[in-house]
């Protein structure tokens, strides 16, 4: 009789584990999928295109000047590559982790430099 009670208790515990485990696993997978889909929803704009968009005024709502004002701000060191990237992040054109991507920031810096250099030589 005692063995039957022990056996029934063990069987109930195992059944409970099988009932709970898929729920925990599904929640974890769902959370991972949501984070991945959020990152996937952002179209990663290239650094060259990001500066081009800034120049055309697509980042004006985020505080980045456009056209000649962008060139002047870059020439006067009033705007940084980090600010352009942050504006791109706020505009949903660049993924948030891009703010730590030194290679991306370097290309933005070079593009800002080229804006100044080529506008002066024209």
Image (cartoon, rainbow, N blue to C red):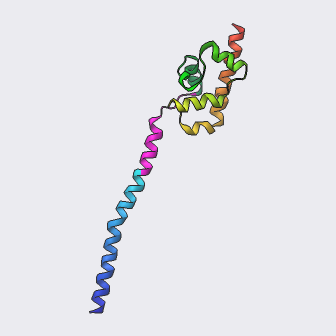
Q: Residue 93's spot in the image, x, y percent?
A: 51, 30
Direction from residue 80 to residue 61 in the image, left or right: left
Above or below for 76 versus 36: above
Vertical position of residue 32 compared to residue 58: above or below? below
| Image position of 110 (left or right of 28) | right
- Count of numbered tags: 0
Q: Is 116 left, or right, of 85 in this rendering?
A: right
Range shown magenta: 31-46
Could you tell me which residue is drawn at 44 percent across and 36 percent down? 41
Quarter holding the N terminus? bottom left
Residue located at (60% from left, 23% from top):
64
Q: Is residue 88 magenta?
A: no
Tell me the quarter of the picture where residue 48 sits. Answer: top right
In this view, the residue in front, 66 or 29, is: 66
Q: Position of residue 29 (x, y in %)?
A: 41, 53
> Can residue 44 be found in the magenta stretch?
yes
Task: Please state the horizontal and vertical placement of residue 70, each as a whole percent of the image.
Answer: 64, 18
Place of residue 94 in the rendered image (x, y in percent of width and height, measured from the top left): 53, 32
Q: Quadrant of residue 17?
A: bottom left
Foreground of the two, 90 or 43: 90
Q: Residue at x 28, y 82 (%)?
A: 8
Figure quadrant of residue 87: top right
Mainly helix, strand or loop, the magenta region? helix
- What is the quadrant of the C terminus in the image? top right
- Residue lying at the far top in this picture: please name it: 122
């Amino acid at each position: 009789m005692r063995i039957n009670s022990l056996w029934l208790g063990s069987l109930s515990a195992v059944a409970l584990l099988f009932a709970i485990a898929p729920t925990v696993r599904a929640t974890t997978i769902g959370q991972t999928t949501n984070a991945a889909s959020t990152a996937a929803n952002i179209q990663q704009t290239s650094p060259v295109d990001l500066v081009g968009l800034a120049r055309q005024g697509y980042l004006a709502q985020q505080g980045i000047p456009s056209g000649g004002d962008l060139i002047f701000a870059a020439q006067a060191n009033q705007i940084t590559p980090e600010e352009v990237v942050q504006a791109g992040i706020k505009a949903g054109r660049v993924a948030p982790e891009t703010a730590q991507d030194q290679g991306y920031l370097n290309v933005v810096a070079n593009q800002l430099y080229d804006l100044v250099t080529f506008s002066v030589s024209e």
